[in-house]
């Protein structure tokens, strides 16, 4: 899949400010543009204004990254909670099944370290651990395993799954959000350039006015005759 590219070569923030400046000039200049080209009227100005408001308030991909980071931190915290819970449960499993190697292995004893460092493996492990607790709950209760600990396995399994789903959903949404954001920014850039192109003729005799509509770091077009635009 080809990633949508920006059509402008400066930052999103610079584009938003540039477009906002253009809007401020259009408060006075719009009638002159409309007289030159009827398509450059209030409707186009208003559409541009809506995009400027969005661009100034949207927050950019940094906000998406921040939200994804928060969800990742939440998942990592749930993994740490799961590790602590398992270490407590481990004591009672060994006590309940001292000679039953197969049952202890079903509870992850002897193989837990292999799954503890991977979020995918941890989530899968706790899903199966949840069922093991239910299968052997009577035996575990018989050695005085705290009911809250046994109930906590199911709760923790659900918490891990929920945190992982939220993280993955945000990852997918971030890709979609980024593409939609670039589409909107490209449209905003197109509006600024429509007024910039027209300004070359609307203000043919005023270099200062033309410069107001030019994008950042741009130069007057070379028409082959330096005196044409003076």
Image: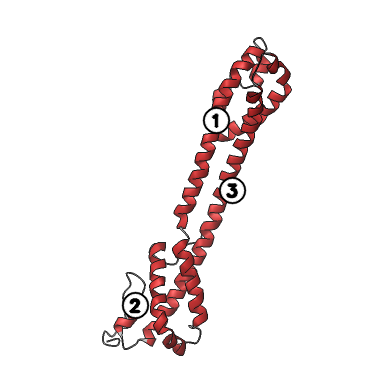
Is 229 drawn above or below residue 182 in the view shown? Answer: below
The reply to whether dot 1 and dot 3 touch (C-beta < 8 Å) is no
What residue is disc 2 on? 212
Q: Position of residue 9 (x, y in %)?
A: 39, 65
Q: Residue at x 43, y 85 (%)?
A: 33
| Residue 68 image position (x, y, % from top left) | 51, 47
Residue 222 vs residue 9, the one in the foreground: 9
Classify residue 60 as left or right of residue 111.
Answer: left
Left or right placement of residue 209 versus residue 118 in this view = left
- Measuring 66% from the left and 21% from the top, which residue is drawn there? 106
Height in image: 209 above or below 217?
Answer: below
Q: Residue at x 68, y 24 (%)?
A: 133
Quarter of the rendering occupied by the C terminus:
bottom left
- Give the label, 2 or 1, closer to the camera: 1
**Residue at disc 2, secondary structure:** helix
Q: Which mark is residue 81?
A: 1
Q: Judging from the image, what secondary structure is the residue with disc 1 in?
A: helix
Q: Name the quadrant of the N terminus.
A: bottom right
- Horizontal and vertical percent for residue 62? 44, 53
Q: Secondary structure at mark 3?
A: helix
How far is mark 1 from mark 3, CA to CA?
22 Å
Marks 3 and 2, Cα distance to the nearest angstrom? Answer: 43 Å
Crowd rating for badge 3 (residues with CA inside 10 Å; few <14, some 14–19, many 20+): few
- Residue 166 lies, in percent from the top left, at 58, 45
Q: Which numbered tag is attached to residue 29? A: none
* Numbered label tally: 3
Residue identified by numbered label 3: 169
Look at 30% across and 83% down and name the residue there. 207
Q: Is residue 184 above or below residue 36?
A: above
Q: Are marks 2 and 1 in contact (CB under 8 Å)?
A: no
Mark 2 closeness class: few <14, some 14–19, many ≥20 residues within 10 Å: some
């Amino acid at each position: 899949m080809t990633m949508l590219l920006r059509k402008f070569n400066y930052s999103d923030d610079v584009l938003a400010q540039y477009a906002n400046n253009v809007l401020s000039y259009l408060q006075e200049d719009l009638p002159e543009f409309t007289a030159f080209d009827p398509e450059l009227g209030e409707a186009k100005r208003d559409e541009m204004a809506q995009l400027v408001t969005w661009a100034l308030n949207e927050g950019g991909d940094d906000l998406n990254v921040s939200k994804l980071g928060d969800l990742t931190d939440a998942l990592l915290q749930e993994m740490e909670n799961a590790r602590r819970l398992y270490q407590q449960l481990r004591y009672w499993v060994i006590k309940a099944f001292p000679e039953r190697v197969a049952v202890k292995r079903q509870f992850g004893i002897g193989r837990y370290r292999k799954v503890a460092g991977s979020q995918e493996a941890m989530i899968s492990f706790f899903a199966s651990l949840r069922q093991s607790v239910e299968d052997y709950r009577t035996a575990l209760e018989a050695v005085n395993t705290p009911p809250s600990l046994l109930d906590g396995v199911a709760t923790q399994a659900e918490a891990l799954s929920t945190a992982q789903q939220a993280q993955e959903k945000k990852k997918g949404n971030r890709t979609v959000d980024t593409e939609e954001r670039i589409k909107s920014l490209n449209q905003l850039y197109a509006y600024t350039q429509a007024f910039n192109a027209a300004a070359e003729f609307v203000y043919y005799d005023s270099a200062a006015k033309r410069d107001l509509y030019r994008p950042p770091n741009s130069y007057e077009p070379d028409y082959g005759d330096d005196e044409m635009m003076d």
